[in-house]
Amino acid sequence: MSPTSSPDPSPDLGPAAAHGQIAAPGPAPSSAPVPTRAAVPAGAPVAPGAAGGRAWSAPLLGHEAEPTVFDLSVPGRRSASFRTTGVPEWSAHELVPADELRPGPPAIAEVSERDLVAHMTRLSHRQYSVDLGAYPLGSCTMKYNPKVCDEAAALPGLTGAHPATPAPYVQGWLSLLWSLADALCRVTGMHAATLQPPAGAAGELTGLLLMRAWHKDKGRSPGKILIPDSAHGTNPASVSLAGYRTVSVPSDERGLVKPATLQGFLDDDIAGIMLTNPNTLGLFEEDIAELAAMVHEAGGLLYYDGANLNAILGVTRPGDMGFDIVHLNLHKTFAVPHGGGGPGAGPVAVTAALADFLPGPTPQRLDDGSFTWVQPAKSIGRIHGWHGNALALARAWAYILANGSDGLRQVSQAAVLNANWLLAQLRGTYTVPYDRPAMHEVVVSTKGAPGTSGELHALDVGKRLLEKGFHAPTVYFPLVVPEALMIEPTETESPETVAALAQALLEIAHEPAQLAAAAPRTTPIGRADEALAARSLVPTWDAGRP
Amino acid sequence: MPHYVPHTDADFARMLADLGLASPGELFRSVPAALRLAGGIDLPPGMPEPDVASQMARLAGTNRSPGDLVCFAGGGAYDHDIPAVTRALAGRSEFVTSYTPYQPEVAQGVLQALFEYQTLVARLSGLPVANASLYDGASAVVEAVNLAVAATGRQTVWVSAGLNPRWREVLATLTAGRDLHLVDIPLVEGTTAWPGLPGSRPSGNAGRPDGAEPGPPAALVAPSPNYLGCIDPLPRAREAADAVGALLVSVFDPVCAGLLRSPGEQGADVAVAEGQPLGTPMAFGGPYLGMFAVSAAHVRRLPGRLVGRTLDVQGRTAYVTTLRAREQDIRREKASSNICTNETLIAIAAMVQLAWLGTEGLRELALRCARGTRYLRDALLTLPGVRPLVGAPVVREFSVELPVNPGTAVERMAEEGFLAGIPVAADGREGLVVAVTEKRTRAEMDAYVSAMEKVIA
C-alpha cells in the first residue's frame, strides 16, 4: 500500500491534538503560560530546513539542537518493509466493525531509514555513557558492562522464546533462571529467590508484601516499618504502597544506626526494618548483628536493600548479618547496563521461613535434572506479567559465570579500594562528614570544605565535572548531609582514572567558585531552565506547536 | 578470572600502601570478624569469556528455536518482525550504558528520544500526556489503578474479566497491602457486562470479603482488544463509568491502534498498553514496556518520569525530566508510586520502531495482523468440533473452543512444530487464544490447521 493509493484520509493526531491544552491542575502557578496545540497535519515541515533531514553532525558539537523526528518528517517518505505472506488482502472495512475503525491512521512520522539512523546517531552523540567515560554516580554502581553479556542476551534461542512456551521446550531458560536464583542465594546467604521483580523498587515492594504475608500467616498485622533517615526515597514510597507506615530512625554521629536508638522505636506494631548495608553514606552498619537480634526479638523482620551489595561480595552476606529478605539490583552489582534509566532487575531472596510466600511460579530442578515451574505453597502471587526481565537476568548470569567466586570477591575489593583511595585524595580539601573506613562509595561535602575558595555548591561541582570530561556524582543525597557529593568510582575504573577524577575534583575546589557556578559550557546544552519546563509544560511535540 | 577489574597486583599493592593497609582484607575492617565469610562465595571460579559464550549458547540452544516452534501465542507477548535498524539503534551503547538522565547537559540523547517516545504514545492513545515508561502492561494497569484511587479517594475498582489474567493477578498482589476492593465484572460473549448498562447482569462478587457494601468504583479497567481477542466497545465502559462518577482506564494495544479508535477519542482518562509489540523481542517475557498516558486533568498524578521541553541558559532547545515533585525520591512516603528505574531503553526501541513503521506502516502492520487473524480463524472454524469461544469481533487474536483439552492440544501441537496458543477459560468453558502477527505466512497457517486437524482427531 502506498500513501497515495491509500483509501484512508489524512493522518489523525487524535482529539487531544485538536482542542487539547495541557492545563495541569494542582499546585502549579496559575499564571503559567498555557501551551496550546493545533491540529497540524503530521509531516508538515515546521522547522524550516529540518524536514527531510540533513546528514550532518553539527548537533553533536553542541552548536545546534537536533531536530525531532517529527521535524524531519516528509509526507510519503517510508522506511517500513513487510514480508511476503500470501495472506488475502482484505480491506480494513472488511475486518473491523465500522464504528470501531479509526478514520485515519495515527500520525507517526514519515522518514527514510537513513535519516532515522542519522537522527538517532546524532542523539546518541549528545549522550554520556559508561562506555564513554567514568560515571561515578553514588549509589548507582555505574560499572562497565561486559560485552560478552550483551552477546549472550542477544542469542536467538533466548530472545525468540515466547514466555508461555510449555516448560519442556524452554529448558534452557528454566535452567538459566534456576541457576541464577541459586547463585544469588549463595551470594546473599539466603534460601530461595524470586526473579520476577523488574527493578529495585519492585523488589522492595515485593519484600514488604512478603513481610506482610508472613505476619498475617502468624495472625499478626503490625503497621510500621522502620527506615533510617539516610535511606533511598524508594524505601518509604514502597512502604506506603505496601500499606505500612514509615517511621524514620535517626542515624548517630558515626552515620550509623545505634542499638540504643533503635530500642526506643521497637514495639508490638513494628513489622520490620529496611536497611542498606553499607548504608547510603558508604559506611558499614557495624552493629548489624545486634540490631538484627533486637528486631527479631520484637517480632519483626529485617529487609536488606541491595543497592550497595557491590561493596561486600564474598566478604560478608546479608544472611549472616541476620537479614530475612534481600533485594538485589542486577543493574548495579551484576553489571546489567542501565539503558538510560532501565530496564533493570530486582530479584528478592529470602530465608527458608519465607520461601513459601515467594511470588510464583518459580523454576525448580527435578531429580532427573530437568526443570519445571512450581507455585510456592503460600505465594503472595505474581509480581510481573511473565517471569521478570528475563534478558537482564541472562546478562547477570553470564556476568556471574565469567566472574565466579574469585572474580566477585575481587570486584568488591577493587570497588572498596578505589573509593578509599579517592577519599584519601579528597580529604583535606572537601569536608568528610563521617570520616570512617569507607566501603564502595564516599560522601563528601562542600559545606565548610577547608580547601575550597569561596562559596562552592555540590550541584556546581557536578556541573563543572561535566566540563572536565566526567559524569557528575550524585548530589544532595543522602539527605542527612548538606551539600553532599556521593561518589562511587566502582571497581572497573583504573587507578589512573580514579586519580584523574580526584585531580579534577581538587582543581574545582581550588578554582574560583564562579567557574563552577557558570558550568557547563562545553556540553551539548548549558544548564536548562527546569522551572520553565514545569511551569509551561511541553511533554510532547504536539503540545509545543503554536 | 576475567579482567573487568583493571588493577594490576602492583596497583593493588601501591594503593593499599597509600592507605596504610597491609592487605585487601583490611579494607573491610569495619565488617565485624564474626560476619566475615570464610572461603568466599560458594560458587565455581570464574570462566574465560569464550567458555561463558559457549555455555550461554548451549543454554540458549536447549530452548526450541523460534524457527522450529512457529509462534501463534500472544496473551501480551507477540512475535513481530523487528527490523535491523531498530536493533542497531536501540543497541547503541550510548543509550544502553547510560544512567537515568539526572544531568540533562550530557543526557540530551536519551531525553529527546523519550520526548519523541512520549509524543508517539500520546498520539496512539489519543491522550495529551504520556510518561517515559513503566515496567510492562501489568505494572501500567497497577499504576493506573493507584492513580484513580488517589484521584477519587475511592477504594473499589471494577475490573473487566477480559483483562489479561496474569496482569489481574499482579494487580491483586501489588495492592494487597492496601484496603482496595477489586470487583471482577464478567464478560458476556466476549464483552464486559458493566453494571448499570441495559442488559447487564449484576456482578458475581460485588460484596466485600468483610460483608460490607462496596463503595462506588474509583475506576473501570477496560481492555480492548481484551484477553480473548475481542473488541470490547469503550463507549459502553465510558457510559458505565459516568453513571458512577469513576475514571475510565483503557487497556489498548499499540499495534491495533493503527486501525482502532483511540482510547482518548472514546473518553478514556488513562490509557495503558503493553509496548512489547513495538520492536522488542518476546525474550521469555521481559524486559517489556509499560505505556501510560493520561488526560490533562491527571498530569500531576502521572507515575514515573516525564520529559519536558525547555530552554537552556543560552536559549537553546533543551529537554529535562520535569514535574519531579511527583516522584518517590522527593515525595518519599507520600508518593503514590515507587517507580525509579523504568524501561527507557525499551521505550527508545519503541520510538525507533514506530518511526521506522511510519504513519502508513503502522496502519499496514495492524491490517496485516487482522488479515492473518481472519484467515486462520476462518480456516480453524472449518475443523470438526472447533467453535468460537465467544462471539464478539476480533482483530489480532481470537479464541476457540476445541474438542480436546486445550492444554493437551498445546502439548501435541508443539510436537508438530507449533506454539499453538495459550489455554484460557471464559464463562466456565475452556479454549485456546491464538494470535497471528504480520510474520505468519499463509503456508504456516495452512500447516497449523492441518496439524490441529490431526491433534483433535
Image (tube, coloured by chain):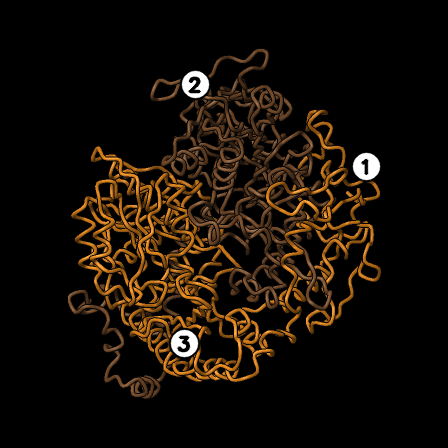
- Residue A145 visible? The answer is no
The residue that disc 2 covers is B206
Quarter placement of the N terminus of chain B: bottom left
Q: How many marks?
A: 3
Left or right of A542? Residue A262 is left
Q: Nearer the viewer, mark 1 or mark 2?
A: 2
- Residue A283 visible? The answer is yes
Q: Real-space Cα distance between discs 2 and 3?
A: 61 Å
Q: Residue at x 22, y 47 (%)?
A: A266
Residue type, numbered disc 2: Ala
* Circle 2 chain: B
Q: Residues within 10 Å of mark 1 (few under 14, many from 20)?
A: few
* Circle 1 chain: A
| Along the viewing direction, whichever of A153 and A328 lies nearer the viewer | A328
Residue B10 rendering spot, x and y as whole percentages: 33, 88
The residue that disc 1 covers is A9
| Along the viewing direction, whichever of A33 and A16 lies nearer the viewer | A33
* Circle 3 chain: A
Residue A97 rendering spot, x and y as whole percentages: 69, 25
Left or right of B161? Residue A210 is left
The residue that disc 3 covers is A431
| Along the viewing direction, whichever of A421 and A432 lies nearer the viewer | A432
